[in-house]
Image (spheres, rainbow, N blue to C red):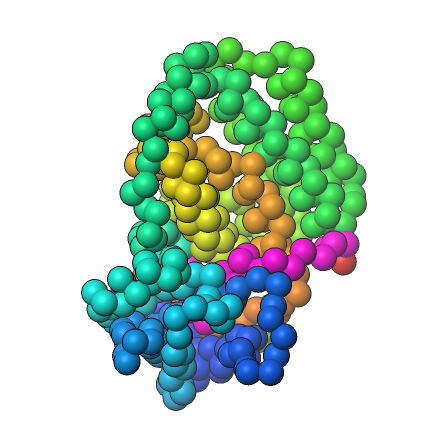
Amino acid sequence: MDLPSTEIIADDLGWAERSNYWLQFTPGKYHRRIPKPDYRQPIILAGHGVRISVDKGTLLLRNGFTHYPQRRETWRLFAGGWRLPSRIVLIDVDGGITFDAIAWLAQHEVPLIQINWRGELINIVSADRELIIPEERRAQLQARNKDGGIAFGTELIRKKIANSADTLRRAFKRTAAIDQAIEELENKNRQLWHNPPRTIPQLLGIEGKAAWTYFGVWRTCEMKWKGTNKHPIPENWHYLGWRTSEYETVRSSNRNATHPINAMLNYAYAVLESQVFMAITAFGLDPTIGILHGNSGKQGLVYDLMEPHRPIVDLKVLDFVRKRTFHRADFTIRSDGVCRLNPELARQVVRAVMSKDKPTVLRQM
């Protein structure tokens, strides 16, 4: 019998238990006597009824509800000082923000980042968002027109492939398959160095083969689960999945994640996208002028500059996955097969990606 709802979810009790489980990893608020940290922490909000407003000159944040029963979290931010967050991240939320709150955030240079339930970056509110310096934009256009951007693009892909090999070394137990994959990636880099492609499509073809090699070995590694006898999971969830959806016809499109690891990577890449976007605009560059992604939406340069950093983000997600045992209630399977993260789990994934801590070596995986 088909369920009338649009999603097939685990029982409410399991959902609440897992939400509380992930909440325990949320760091506490700063207290008066603690020493100043090395960097400012982000504040991550999720759920129904998020509210951001200004109250008596302070910014008042009210977190949403993700399960029942739940105690509402609140933050009151005062102007100035190191306790202001590095940014505020909204994950799969509904609620409201006032105009004076937007002005407060801009005045105090606290970016607001919104990510939807698919793990897509859908909004950035930042004081520098529209600051594009004409001279820098002209330099971008000249670089692209000089040789079609092939030298610039080749260097990005070389760095991405090198970082991919490094992630395989650090993230997986060394086996013959891993060693072979690393050797193939290094051969691809030597090919780019000694016999560079002459066109962007040729370059993307090499990058695609490297990605096939890189993600191909992920499927040899298991995810840890509990309670699967009572709450079964799809067979392919026992192993790390391929970086694509079963319902996508284009391999590079992963919007509809059907595997937990891909759903987590979507959130991680959304964080990376926001960081690259803010760095680009801070330098006065035009995010729309891309080389590899020149015709991919409105942020071609953002997607270009993300490429070398994707394997670095992958390492953080793999580190997060290795250290945890998951439960069926951590994920929702929609009626169309798309996998959706528990919002409290999504908060922890985003926090792990934004952390300054270096991932540990994952030899035990």
Q: Residue at x 43, y 68 (%)?
A: 80
Q: Quadrant of residue 228?
A: bottom right
Name above or below for residue 18 compared with residue 212.
Answer: below
Q: Quadrant of residue 164?
A: top right
Along the horizontal axis of the image, is 169 left or right of 27?
right
Quadrant in the picture for the N terminus: bottom left
Q: Residue at x 58, y 48 (%)?
A: 314
Q: Residue at x 29, y 43 (%)?
A: 130
Question: Can residue 156 be found in the magenta stretch?
Answer: no
Query: Residue 265: where, in percent of width, then height?
Result: 50, 52
Q: Residue at x 38, y 84 (%)?
A: 72
Of the pair 355 and 75, the residue shown nearer to us: 75
Name above or below for residue 361 compared with residue 244.
Answer: below
Query: Residue 171: where, in percent of width, then height?
Result: 70, 50
Q: Give the residue furthest to the left.
A: 99
Looking at the rendering, the stretch of residues picked out in magenta corresponds to 339-363
Query: Residue 293: where, in percent of width, then height?
Result: 40, 30
Query: Residue 4: where, in percent of width, then height?
Result: 24, 70
Residue 253 in view: no
Question: Can residue 362 be found in the magenta stretch?
Answer: yes
Residue 83 in view: yes
Name above or below for residue 107 compared with residue 217.
Answer: below
Of the pair 345 and 99, the residue shown nearer to us: 99
Q: Give the residue furthest to the front.
A: 80
